[in-house]
Image (spheres, grey):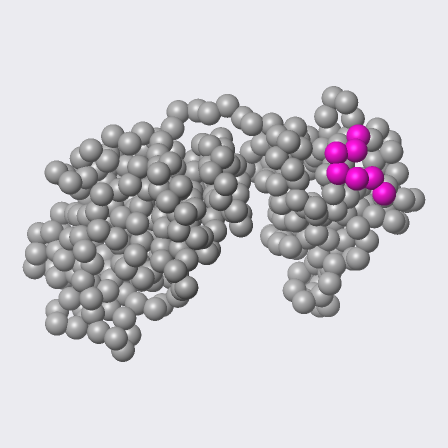
Amino acid sequence: MPEPDDVLTEGAAIRLAGDNVIGRETVGASVMLGDAATVIIADPLDGLDVSGVWNGSRFHLHGPLVGDVGVRLFGHPPDSPKWSWTRSSDGRPVHLLTRLPEGCVYLGVGRPVQGGYADGCLTFAALTIEPELTLELLDRVRPPSELGTLPNLDWLARMTASPLEALAQFVEGWIPEIDQDLGDFVAAPWDVPEPLAVFYRLARRRPALLGVQNRLRSPRTWEERRDGLIAFGDENQGGFIWLFDPSQPDPEVWIDEDGDGVRREHQPMSGFLLQFALFEAMMNAPYKALHTALAVEHVDKLAAALTPVPWEPWRWPNDSTRFYVAPGVIATTMDQWHGNTSAWVGAVHRSVLRPLRQLGIPWEHFDG
């Protein structure tokens, strides 16, 4: 059995699969199914939809891949009458390698943990890499890529004097337009306050702006709740709704927690929408780093490496969410039990996460 960092010829790598090998090709990788094992050989590429090493502990396989690959990794395909997510995978090992000029570098064994299907065909698979790659090996098999143009922080200087200008600058820098046009957001019988009108104009060709974790409603689905306040947003698990007073030009925003009354957000609507956009852009960013229970010294290191957003905390999920930014980076910290803090970081490019390697933070997930 080869060890991580061993270099094999391609023929020797394929022989790990055993006899009766069937080959399948996908973008960025070759998959060999044999009597003894599955062998996946990836090219040293880096992209959102390209197969290969994703981070030190994850390998992504993008399809579509015909049914025998899905059966080998996850059990019966989902259109089979015997399909069940509780069914174990095939049981034969999955050997992961990357094809470099000097040969095929052995990475370790892959454990299938997540699969996506469409029309009965495997379209995506995530596998853990065991053992986790060293940083040196990671940089060899997934070389750092060039940084493009990053969203800047010009909006930060405008957020106090003009939160709506800051919102527009942030959104236009972070969230690209797509071909889909959601059209005009018309509300009846209420007028749309100016901050929400600006937000919905920005969202016409940016559906993600309406939320991927939490969600802001289209005005057509607003509804009146207590004391004439209008429900316009929902927490992702239904824990509460966001409300506003339609009679105000820049309304206060309220959280309505079922059975626990209402509490006011620190920022009026214009500032709340910027905080909402920051959080959703972070959650929807393609590259992430996170830890759910950091000690205070690690939180201080992360905060010192970034620029704080100078407002009172956002009240989702527990009135302690503070934002920090850098070009192409959004981070939040949130208080947890026992004096610990959770930290989430989203980035538009994995290379902007690389400086966070140097902070000594024991990340639970790190895409840099």
Per the image, is 296 magenta?
A: no
Q: Report the predominant secondary structure element of the magenta stretch.
A: loop
* Residue 15 drawn at (x, y percent): 88, 38
Would you place residue 154 above or below residue 280 in this image? Answer: above
Choose top left, top right, bottom left or bottom right for residue 149: top left
Residue 2 is a magenta residue: yes
Nearer the observer, 172 or 366:
366
Picture coordinates of residue 101, whole percent (x, y): 74, 21
Q: Quadrant of residue 43?
A: top right
Q: Is residue 292 above or below residue 9?
A: below
Quadrant, the N terminus: top right
Q: Compare residues 171 and 9 and report the one nearer the observer.
A: 9
- The residue lying at 51 percent from left, 47 percent from top is 363
Q: Which residue is depicted at the point 87% across and 49% down?
A: 36
48 on left or right of 214: right
Q: Can you see residue 190?
A: no
Position in image of residue 323 (x %, y %): 31, 46
Image location of residue 137, percent across then percent down? 67, 33
Q: Nearer the viewer, residue 363 or 24?
A: 363
For the residue pair 202 and 366, the one nearer the viewer reads as 366
Q: Is residue 271 left or right of residue 283?
A: left
Taking the view exactly as shown, the residue that stands out farthest to the front is 297
Residue positioned most to the right: 19
The residue lying at 56 percent from left, 33 percent from top is 47
Q: At x 23% / y 40%, what residue is drawn?
A: 167
Residue 1 visible within the image: yes
- Residue found at the very far bottom of the displayed protein: 259
Question: Magenta residues, as a range?
Answer: 1-7
